[in-house]
Image (cartoon, rainbow, N blue to C red):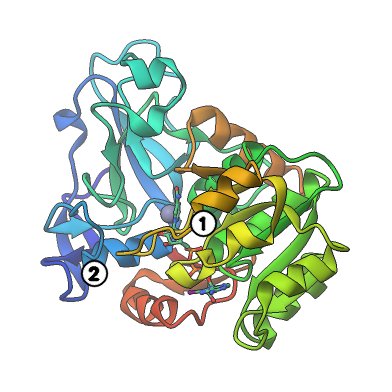
Amino acid sequence: TIPKVQRAAVVAQTGQGVQVKEDFPVKQPEDLKPGECLIRLHCTGVCHTDLHAALGDWPVPPKVPLVGGHEGVGEVVAIGKGTVDSPVKLGDRVGIKWIAYSCLTCEQCRKGLEQNCSSVKLSGYTTDGTFQQYVQSWVNVVTPIPEGISSEAAASVLCAGVTVYRALKYSRTLPNDWVVLPGAGGGLGHLAVQYAKTMGLRVIAIDGGEEKRKLCVEKLGADAWIDFTQTKDIVAEVKRITGGPGANAAVVTTASPSGYTQAVDYLREGGTLMAVGLPAKAELNASIFFTVFKSITICGSYVGNRQDAVEAVNIAASGKVQVYYASKPLQELEGVYDDLGKGKIAGRIVLTM
Ligand code: 8ID
Ligand code: ZN
């Protein structure tokens, strides 16, 4: 049976913290429209995006009151009456990602850019997300979770994994190429190191501090490490590591603009900069002359579509990518935000319900 109320972490107004409520309403099965479903969540990852949402620091504001969260895994407990041809059934284990809903018929959806659907809904931003025990979703958009991966590990793949997998997929790199990963010790970055290795790339991990160095180099097998808090000339260091010409690509996943500075300068001719991290108010500074003269490509890469999600989850379920996470109860979300803001979390935090 589905309860009428539940535990949820609610942002009443952006910039004013989160309150954990025990009496937040649960969408009832009889209120689901055709195509909608209800998921009982096992757990949810906490992405730096959720902190941006709680702070309201992005140029596009979230809804309020807001239940954040977009890395949820749970099981389907209800499907809206009148739903036809559902790809999932009651009891299936599924994932909730940032793209909560896309129409699948508009121009962008037809092109596979479901992220840019003209009627897109975003989990934990424009529709309530996964920091609650029950979340309403859509049968055509949830990600099936295969056996061979725990719900906790699958959770972080649904945003962090999907996003870096897609960014690497479109980074125009070939096996043995060098990729630079500023933010490598964070939630997105630590998965980027592993997807990159799986794709046969050589990895230069950039982040700060001994814990993140250990994670990137000793646990995940990054080929080289640069501590941005200690290395003065990052461009020279990347060039030295690559034997002179610089890296073939960079996938930047820092939540601060500093991860972007000099990226164009340490790329070799023909290189690609994949912009992923979303600092609140920042401009991308690149020399127009050298962007042209070196034939540099600069791309924005935004989460991924359903196929990217299936591919990223399947690679993780095959054991090639491991999520390094610590579990905490949902009630500790506020403290997790503090740590994320200070850059203190190596890997991911996964909240249990
Ligand atoms: O679709 C997208 N493009 C997408 C999807 C998901 C998340 C974008 N994001 C965005 C988030 O909104 C956030 O702005 O990516 C950014 C990173 O998210 P995250 O991985 O969840 O954050 P984190 O765990 O805090 O990791 C960030 C890492 O960057 C390091 C920090 O030490 C941390 O490990 N870092 C920073 I801050 N400045 C750095 C610098 N100058 C740096 N590493 C290297 N050089
Ligand atoms: Zn995210």
The answer to whether the residue labelled 2 contacts the one labelled 1, judged by CB atoms less than 8 Å apart, is no
Screen quadrant of the C terminus: bottom left
How many residues crowd mark 1 within 10 Å: few (<14), some (14–19), many (20+)? few
- Residue bearing the label numbered 2: 55
Q: Amino acid at mark 1?
A: Ser
At 21% from the left and 64% from the top, the residue drawn is 56
Q: Position of residue 219 (x, y in %)?
A: 78, 70
At 60% from the left and 57% from the top, the residue drawn is 264
Screen quadrant of the N terminus: top left
Q: Position of residue 39 (x, y in %)?
A: 35, 41
At 64% from the left and 41% from the top, the residue drawn is 295
Q: Position of residue 128 (x, y in %)?
A: 23, 49
**353 above or below 41?**
below
At 55% from the left and 28% from the top, the residue drawn is 307
Q: Nearer the viewer, residue 37 or 341?
A: 341
Q: Amino acid at mark 2?
A: Leu
The CB of the residue at mark 1 lies under 8 Å from ligand 1: no
Residue 275 showing in the rendered view: no
Q: Secondary structure at mark 2?
A: helix
Q: Nearer the viewer, residue 321 or 298?
A: 298
Distance of mark 2 from mark 1, alpha carbons? Answer: 32 Å
Quarter assignment of residue 77:
top left
Q: Nearer the viewer, residue 24 or 290?
A: 290
**34 above or below 285?**
above
Residue 177 showing in the rendered view: yes
Q: Is residue 144 left or right of residue 83?
A: right
- Residue bearing the label numbered 1: 287
How many residues crowd mark 2 within 10 Å: few (<14), some (14–19), many (20+)? some
Among numbered discs 2 and 1, the one appearing first in the sequence: 2
Q: Is residue 189 left or right of residue 134?
A: right
Say which of marks 2 and 1 sits in front: 1
Q: Secondary structure at mark 1?
A: loop
